[in-house]
Amino acid sequence: MTAFTGHIATDIAEIQPCAWDTCLPGEAECHGYFKACDEAAARSGVGLRCGAVFVEDSEGTAAVAPLFRLDYRLDTPLQGRLRQAADAVFGRFPGLVTLKVICVGSPYAERCHLGFAPRLDAAGRAEAARALLGSLERQAAAEGAHLVAFKDLAPAEDALTAPMLGHAGFAALGSLPVATLDLPFPDEAAYLASLSASTRKDIRRKLAKAKAVRIEHRSDISGLEEVIGDLYESTRRQSGLDYGDLEVLPPGYFPAVARALGERAVFALYWIGEDLAAFNLLLVEPGRVIDKFLGMRYPLAREHNLYAVSWMANVRFCIARSIPLLQSGQTAYASKLRFGSRLVPSVIRFRHRSAPLQWLLGRISPLLSFARFDPDLAALAKTKPEKAA
């Protein structure tokens, strides 16, 4: 049997880009993307300490994944008044609710990019995953981390790792699902026809009132770096949700990603006269567009219905390029479902190095699911989905 050896890299640059991208083919969130994110965080001193975990065998790199460290507050999923109460407890007893975590995944991605060399069969992938887990456990012990975790495992990755992680005593915590829109439509009219009559009417009304909006697509954002960063921060503060360090982008993120990805990073810019009123960062793959981040200038964006305008611009962008999937992330679920999206589940798997504390965390994890406290998901759980006309 091939011998697999796991390693922890303090810098993703320690792994050859071609080896990484072979394990995760076709991803816009590629080696260059994560390297750009990590370097932006290191330059600014803002952001989580990142790296990577990888596995080698006699033929080279067999498995890869990004990695980061986090001081995780158990009350992170809580929002609104519950979070305010938890903040008061944290202020007096920070050690009571904070755990040191070494986590597979990235704070800059909505799923766990766990990739394997295509030459591996199912048994080889399972063996490489065990070597990867072994290296994580040794690293956690060396650093004194309380938890080892896998952040935002999508269904495919979770199906691969769940038997191994379950056998190793990992528990599950519900993460936020990822909104995804299927676009098997020949044109915009066919997409609109798939929605309910009331939603079609609402979208058309909003587009009719947005004739002053000029839309531009570009990959080079020279001269706009600061305003784009400000628009993102403005929108993040407006959201009313707070997931701590997991939602903070390092200064310089947007220009760093633009330089690293070139034409795979497309900025959709929404101008009102000479004012940049909104932007979308789109990461473009052959079969998917990731609507990565949205930033808006308030109240101008509301006055011109820029959320609906940007949504339809992204739908047109995909249809014009025959791209069948628009992934729009882990926020604003009510609007995205109304516009035809489906929710792809996501899970966090974790294990405390102390067996008694792992038993306790495993029992309370259903109560701390991220989806449980997201206001959109909580409201949607109480209502019936709107039927298409």
Image: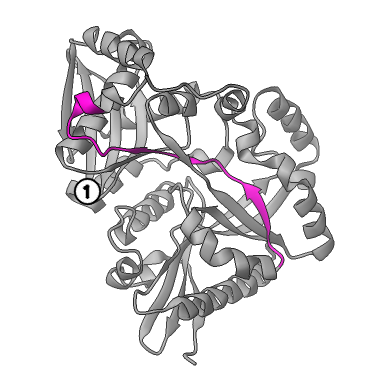
Q: Is residue 109 above or below residue 349?
A: above
On screen, residue 214 versus residue 174, left or right, reads: left
On screen, residue 195 versus residue 285, left or right, reads: right
The x, y position of residue 199, in whole percent, is: 36, 16
Quarter location, residue 280: top left
Quarter location, residue 272: top left
Quarter location, residue 303: top left
Q: What amino acid is at disc 1?
A: Arg
For the point 76% across and 53% down, the residue is 362
Q: Is residue 41 above or below residue 383?
A: below
Q: Is residue 49 above or below residue 373?
A: below
Which colour scheme appears in the figure?
A: one colour
Q: Is residue 15 in view?
A: yes
Identify the magenta region.
169-190
In the image, residue 353 lies in the stretch drawn in magenta: no
The x, y position of residue 261, in whole percent, is: 24, 51
For the point 36% across and 87% down, the residue is 59
For the point 31% across and 56% down, the residue is 27
Q: Which residue is denoted by mark 1 in the rendering?
A: 264
Question: Is disc 1 placed on a helix, strand or loop?
Answer: helix
Question: Which is nearer the eye, 51 or 136?
Answer: 136
In the image, residue 174 lies in the stretch drawn in magenta: yes
Question: Which is nearer the eye, 351 or 97?
Answer: 351
The x, y position of residue 36, in whole percent, is: 33, 53
On screen, residue 239 versus residue 193, left or right, reads: right
The x, y position of residue 49, in whole percent, is: 51, 56
